[in-house]
Image: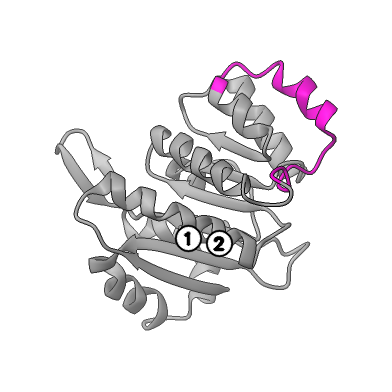
Amino acid sequence: MEVHIQGFSGKHYCPRMASMNKTCFQAIQTHSPTKPVLIFVSSRRQTRLTALDLIAHLGGENDPKQWMHMDEWEMEELTHMVRDPNLRLTLAFGIGLHHAGLMERDRSLVEKLFSEQKIQSLIATSTLAWGVNLPAHLVIVKGTEYFDGKQGRYEDFPITDVLQMMGRAGRPQYDDKAVAVILVHDVKKAFYKKFLYEPFPVESSLLQV
């Protein structure tokens, strides 16, 4: 597994998350321009905001719908059945959303389209890492913190969660390598580099996850 860790400055959470979107887009175009991509974010709101920013970046490309790998008429028929308006919009650009706020039918459709490689990118909350098995060529962990409502502040994901998200990278039946890109608050970069690179090879840890 190829692992890239990038730090982002900024004291405030939301602007820092927004500053990561361009890097997400560049990582997809560099490491997985045509293969499946999973982007993990910390909240339902972040699935939507990340998707809208990626769509804006796609707008500057020659083919803004390059991540949709199916006929447009077929996608139009499917999106008529989608209840969530944000998902209806993002699917047209080959981007799926996955979080607990979606109706079961919408979520199942997204899982089916992604597993059949009809949409290339899936933006999901971290719970997907422990749920449905949807491997990807590239996994991007967009931020390693979440808002803890009980504590009223942002907390770090347990390292086991980060490893579980990274573990979704790799499709043995299709790929001979996998890529994980971890985007972190710059003050945490040294910790993640030390943890992921030094004590043990990442490959062996992922086999045990």
The one nearer the camera, 91 or 22, is 22
Question: How far is mark 1 from mark 2, CA to CA?
Answer: 5 Å
Direction from residue 99 to residue 187 in the image, left or right: left
Q: Give the amino acid type for the residue marked by disc 1 in the picture.
A: Thr
Element type where label 2 sits in the image: helix
Residue that appears at 70% across and 22% down? 79
x then y, percent, for residue 86: 54, 26
Residue 39, label in figure? none
Location of residue 10 by image quarter:
bottom left
Which residue was labeled with disc 1? Answer: 23
Location of residue 44 by image quarter:
top left
Instruction: Identify the colour scheme used.
Output: one colour
Q: Which residues are magenta?
A: 64-85
Task: Decide: is 90 above or below 207.
Answer: above
The one nearer the camera, 74 or 199, is 74
State the residue lying farthest toward the bottom: 198
The one nearer the camera, 63 or 195, is 63
Residue that appears at 67% across and 72% down? 177
Task: Decide: is 77 above or below 92.
Answer: above
